[in-house]
Image (cartoon, coloured by chain):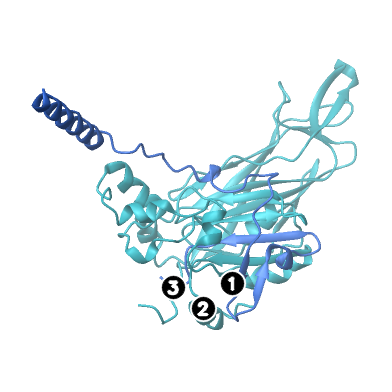
Chain colours: A blue, B cyan
C-alpha cells in the first residue's frame, strides 16, 4: 500500500514535470501599439536625473501646452 | 539625435521635451557633449520608469535567455532587438517611441514603430499633430481650382525613417473637392509611384464638411476651406535596403495629386497633377560615445 502510494506520487510528479516540459508558459506576441499608456490616459510620474545630474519630474518637463516625451533605446551601442 | 534640430520648433509649440533611456548618466553626458544636446536626457538606470510605463523591451531578455532559439522568439528579436544578434547589455532597454502629452500628462497622441529600425522623425510627428512653420522648402502650384503647397517633413532622411509629405490645399473661391465618404465623385487623394524600399502608409485626411449640392439636392463630404493632409512614408531600414541605398545621396519620390473639383453649378473633369520631391539621403549615424565597452 505504502509502495503503491509512493509510486503514484512519483508518477504524478513525473506527469507534472512532463507537462511543464511540454507546455512552456504561453508567450504573448508583442504588439507595440498596445504597450504603455494609450491616448487619453495619464502617464505615470517619474523622478529622474538628466545628463548634468539635474532631477526632473513629469511636471517639471511639461511646457505651457504639454510635453513630448521620447523613449529611446540607448545612447551607448 | 535629430530632436535637437527641432528643439526650437517644439518649444515654440509650448511643449517641453525630454528623452528617457536606461543609460547611466555618464553615458548620457558624453552623448550630449558629442552631439550638442541641450534638452534633458533622463537616465533610468535600472529601468524602473521604463517598466512602470509598460515599455520594457522584454524581447531583449528572451534574446539572451534559454528560449532564444525558439523560432517565434528569434523572429521578435530581429524585429525588436537586433538583426545582428543581441547581447546581455541590451536587457533593460525600452521599446522606442514618443508620447505627446497635454498639460495634465494625458496622452494626446503616441508614435511607436513596428520595427526597431524604423523611427518617426520628430518633424514628421510635429507635422502630424498639425504644427506649422516647417522650414523645409516646398513646391507651390496652382490649377484652375486649387492652390497647392507640398513639402516633406524634413530635407534629409536616413534608412529606417518614417517621414511625411504634407499638402496644404486652398480651394479657389466657390470651389470644393471631395472628401472620403463621397460616393460617385473622385475624392482628393495622392498616389505615390511605387519604388523599392519606400513604403507608402495610408493617407491621413482632416475632418471634412457636408456640402449641400442644390441641383441634385445631395449632401456630400467635401473640403472647401483650406485644408492640409499628410502622406506618411517609410524608407525601409533593413539590411537589404541599407545595402541598396548605400552611396546614394538623394531620394526622389514621385506621385500625383488627384481630385475632382466642382463649384456651385458645375463639376470639372477629374484632374491629376504630377509631383516630385527630392530629399537628401543620409546614412544611419553609427558613431557612439566612448565609455562603456
Answer few, some or many: residues within 10 Å of disc 2's Cα (few below 14, many 20 plus, some between 14 and 19): many
List the residue tagged with mark 2: B31
Residue B183: percent from the left, percent from the top? 71, 22
**Residue B151 visible here:** no
Measure the alpha-carbon separation of dots 2 and 1.
Answer: 9 Å
Which residue appears at 55% of the width and 53% of the height?
Answer: B253
* Circle nearer the viewer, 2 or 1: 1
**Mark 1, residue position:** B41
Q: Secondary structure at mark 1?
A: strand
Q: Residue at x 39, y 51 (%)?
A: B59
Contact, CB < 8 Å: mark 3 with mark 1?
A: no
Q: Residues within 10 Å of mark 1 (few under 14, many from 20)?
A: many
Dots 3, 2 in contact, CB < 8 A: yes
Where is mark 3, residue-wise? Answer: A76
Kindly tell me whether residue B174 is visible in this rendering. yes
Parent chain of label 3: A
* Residue B11, quarter of the rendered image: bottom right
Cα gap from disc 3 to disc 2, whole angstroms = 8 Å
Where disc 2 sits, the SS reads helix
Contact flag, marks 2 and 1 (Cβ < 8 Å): yes
Which quarter shows the N terminus of chain B?
Answer: bottom right
Amino acid at each position: 500500500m505504502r509502495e503503491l502510494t509512493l509510486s503514484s506520487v512519483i508518477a504524478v510528479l513525473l506527469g507534472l514535470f512532463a507537462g511543464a516540459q511540454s507546455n512552456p508558459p504561453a508567450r504573448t506576441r508583442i504588439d507595440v501599439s498596445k504597450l504603455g499608456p494609450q491616448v487619453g490616459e495619464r502617464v505615470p510620474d517619474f523622478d529622474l536625473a538628466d545628463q548634468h545630474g539635474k532631477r526632473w519630474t513629469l511636471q517639471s518637463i511639461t511646457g505651457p501646452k504639454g510635453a513630448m516625451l521620447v523613449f529611446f533605446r540607448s545612447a551607448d551601442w | 539625435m535629430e530632436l535637437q534640430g527641432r528643439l526650437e520648433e517644439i518649444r515654440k509649440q509650448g511643449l517641453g521635451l525630454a528623452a528617457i533611456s536606461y543609460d547611466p548618466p555618464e553615458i548620457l553626458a558624453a552623448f550630449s557633449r558629442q552631439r550638442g544636446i541641450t534638452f534633458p536626457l533622463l537616465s533610468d538606470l535600472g529601468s524602473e520608469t521604463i517598466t512602470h510605463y509598460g515599455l520594457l523591451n522584454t524581447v531583449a531578455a528572451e534574446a539572451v535567455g534559454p528560449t532564444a532559439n525558439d523560432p517565434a522568439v528569434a523572429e521578435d528579436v530581429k524585429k525588436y532587438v537586433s538583426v545582428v544578434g543581441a547581447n546581455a547589455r541590451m536587457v533593460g532597454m525600452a521599446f522606442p517611441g514618443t508620447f505627446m502629452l497635454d498639460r495634465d500628462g494625458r496622452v494626446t497622441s503616441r508614435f511607436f514603430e513596428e520595427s526597431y529600425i524604423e523611427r518617426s522623425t520628430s518633424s514628421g510627428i510635429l507635422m502630424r499633430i498639425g504644427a506649422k512653420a516647417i522650414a523645409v522648402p516646398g513646391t507651390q502650384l496652382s490649377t484652375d481650382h486649387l492652390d497647392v503647397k507640398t513639402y516633406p517633413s524634413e530635407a534629409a532622411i536616413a534608412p529606417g525613417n518614417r517621414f511625411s509629405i504634407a499638402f496644404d490645399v486652398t480651394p479657389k473661391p466657390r470651389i470644393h473637392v471631395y472628401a472620403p465618404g463621397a460616393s460617385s465623385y473622385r475624392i482628393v487623394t495622392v498616389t505615390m509611384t511605387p519604388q523599392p524600399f519606400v513604403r507608402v502608409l495610408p493617407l491621413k485626411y482632416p475632418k471634412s464638411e457636408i456640402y449641400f449640392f442644390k441641383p441634385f439636392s445631395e449632401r456630400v463630404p467635401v473640403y472647401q476651406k483650406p485644408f492640409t493632409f499628410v502622406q506618411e512614408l517609410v524608407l525601409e531600414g533593413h539590411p537589404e535596403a541599407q545595402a541598396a541605398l548605400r552611396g546614394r545621396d538623394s531620394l526622389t519620390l514621385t506621385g500625383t495629386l488627384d481630385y475632382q473639383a466642382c463649384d456651385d453649378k458645375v463639376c470639372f473633369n477629374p484632374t491629376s497633377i504630377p509631383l516630385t520631391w527630392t530629399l537628401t539621403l543620409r546614412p544611419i549615424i553609427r558613431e557612439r560615445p566612448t565609455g562603456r565597452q
